[in-house]
Image: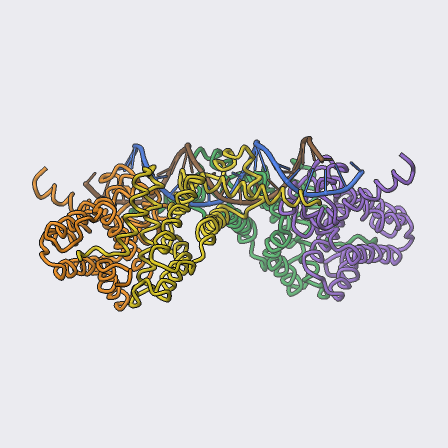
Chain colours: A orange, B yellow, C purple, D green, E blue, F brown
Amino acid sequence: MTSSDGGAAARRREQILDAAARVFAEKGYHEAGIADIATDLGIGHGTFYRYFENKKDIVGQAMDLAVRRIGQSVLEEEDPSSSNTLAEFHAQIERVYLRLFALQDRQPYLIRFLYRQATDPTRLGLALDGFLGYTEQLLRNGITKGFLRPDIDTEIAGQALVAIMFDVMRRSASAEMSAELRQRWMSTGTRMMLEGLQRR
Amino acid sequence: MTSSDGGAAARRREQILDAAARVFAEKGYHEAGIADIATDLGIGHGTFYRYFENKKDIVGQAMDLAVRRIGQSVLEEEDPSSSNTLAEFHAQIERVYLRLFALQDRQPYLIRFLYRQATDPTRLGLALDGFLGYTEQLLRNGITKGFLRPDIDTEIAGQALVAIMFDVMRRSASAEMSAELRQRWMSTGTRMMLEGLQRR
Amino acid sequence: MTSSDGGAAARRREQILDAAARVFAEKGYHEAGIADIATDLGIGHGTFYRYFENKKDIVGQAMDLAVRRIGQSVLEEEDPSSSNTLAEFHAQIERVYLRLFALQDRQPYLIRFLYRQATDPTRLGLALDGFLGYTEQLLRNGITKGFLRPDIDTEIAGQALVAIMFDVMRRSASAEMSAELRQRWMSTGTRMMLEGLQRR
Amino acid sequence: MTSSDGGAAARRREQILDAAARVFAEKGYHEAGIADIATDLGIGHGTFYRYFENKKDIVGQAMDLAVRRIGQSVLEEEDPSSSNTLAEFHAQIERVYLRLFALQDRQPYLIRFLYRQATDPTRLGLALDGFLGYTEQLLRNGITKGFLRPDIDTEIAGQALVAIMFDVMRRSASAEMSAELRQRWMSTGTRMMLEGLQRR
DNA sequence: TATGAATGAGCGTTCATTCAT
DNA sequence: CATGAATGAACGCTCATTCAT
């Protein structure tokens, strides 16, 4: 196997994973057949089994890839300890939202796919928890830098943050979300979270 | 046709709905067969079709029932405009959590079932949005009574509240949640939401 | 069992047979369910099995009854050796047609039912052959009386006669047959059969 | 995609159609399962659905094929306007009988299959009417050539002819028909039809 | 005697997976 | 390495039949 061979095979593998995510997102795992994915790619469906063990294998790897993609294009470009002031923190949260929205515009099926695989609840949970570490780092940095309350339960707050963000993603995945609504989530929603709901 | 007769059919219907929710929660809609539900009840699978049109009919009605159950046992016992002070509000949110946890202890499969039906993403969304109205009422009452900030975007905040609460439910559905963690969500989590994350 | 009891049961039996023939004629044997017949009569479908062994039993008995009915109301009222001249013979054949048409108007489903049970080809054959003896008698009488050709192969001709008559019945059973077409079969068709197709 | 490839699929299709006709003829449409046809061919029953939409599709196409086969091997080889004399006409009718008998010897199940589909009465009627046009041409040719009576009601007589011929087919399909009986139908039956039943 | 709730054998159909070409 | 014809396990659903009331 020359290097070009391995690359070609790897590229084909990723093509199939992409098509799988797309098709699964559109029709759902059970409703989509292997043949649908093959047709979508214009290849024979037998070819599938040269790259993946079986249908379960494909969906699992597609999920992993989706989670990795989201992580790469959103979180990894944003150093969780870069903010030094509350304003910077606020801006950073907004940037994360912006990146999530941009990703959703580029690959609208990614999040849809992720949510449709909630068939096994643990699976989605594990995927979301992949982002939990990141949000906790964000919060701990704020505490260290002194612009977030020192008594924050970072585990609880981190989970809440992820829950909200992915609920936003879910909503904008099931129906096109207006730019205005996105803005409200980014600015108003974030400010609310920082300042709290109680009157002062 | 005594009153007990009419009740027998209705009781059988509910038994089947309950078993369906249980089985669907455990194995998932597609993985679970009608025969599984029938076996679970110790009845013939043909009996199923005397009470429900088909598999889709069952899952739809089971979802409706689940949503109704949650609504009845949790929200309907809690008047959304009963709180007059921040402390009362805080206590009310805690009571809602308590009721959700209690429901989950009584019927652990209810929430699992709900989440597994995310197969069609809109389906779960509609279910959750059924609770959105309630949370918005909670928030508007707080604003009217003067203990919540008057500039709250109740739509955004309401959705966030629902997102968090159901994420908690999801977590405690996939793995037993410790009493201590529940407590942290109820008190610390709620306090955080009211007071905000920023340092004062 | 008093005489009134036996009569009531017999009456009920016949009601069911009639309803069965009607329903089988309309929907076909396999498409019609026992429940359809019961509903048609306004009785519980369990009652069926007090009068008949099973579905096959019912259809068999209904066929026998249908054949008997046709025989009674058509052929038995017409003495096969009553004609003494060709004109009387011609008139007799027309009367048989008229009686068949009248029966079909009274119970349109009878012939339809008979033909739909062709599922087993032998069954219909046996039913038709029940009329073969009658037509042979008709022909033999004509030969004896001297107005039909003495060299007629009565078996062949008798079968042909039955075939034509029941094809007419079949046609007028699948779609309403115009009075004019009926007339053509009765007079023109019969004349043709007597006089032959060849030019003289 | 050589010519042999295209032929392989077509050949398999025809094999299945043939087996279906055979099995349906023997057991009847409803009594025969797809599995019976598959077993009869020694193929997996899933293979079926690569060539036919569903069971209804198969039976419909098999009927069309049966009608076409009969038409091809019997009627299409016999120009309906080839006879010029009564003797030639008589001989032509006999040839049609001979061809039908030969077809039945080659594929005994063809006619049985056709008759068993009488489940829907119109179905068989439509099939038979496909031959009506042919017999009417036969008769009109005889009138034109002057050896048949000019006042023949060709519609009536044509239908009668078809009815007789297919009744013969039906009889020889349900039970083996002796060579002698066949001969009687061909010669005596035909002569009778031409010369009429009345004495001269 | 009449009823209809319960039953399960049976069948049509799908589709992931295999393997000969 | 790519293909797609063949396969059969699996499942949803129907309906004739039974039997407790």
Can I make out residue D3 in this image?
Answer: no
The residue lying at 75 percent from left, 63 percent from top is: C184
Given residues D151 and B5, the one toward you in this image is B5
User: Tag count in the figure?
Assistant: 0
How far across and how far down the image is residue B6, in percent? 65, 45
Q: Is residue B154 above or below residue F5?
A: below
Side of D47 where A148 appears, left or right: left
How far across and how far down the image is residue A11, in percent? 16, 47
The residue lying at 30 percent from left, 65 percent from top is: B153
- The image quadrant of residue C91 is bottom right
The quadrant the C terminus of chain D occupies is bottom right
Given residues B133 and B9, the one toward you in this image is B133
The residue lying at 91 percent from left, 50 percent from top is: C82
How far across and how far down the image is residue A16, in percent? 23, 47
Can I make out residue D133 in this image?
Answer: yes
- The image quadrant of residue B144 is bottom left
Side of A3 where A62 appears, left or right: right
Q: Residue furthest left?
A: A3
Given residues C17 and A61, the one toward you in this image is A61
Q: Is residue E19 above or below residue D134?
A: above
Side of C20 where A98 appears, left or right: left
Given residues B157 and D181, the one toward you in this image is B157
How far across and how far down the image is residue C145, in percent? 90, 49
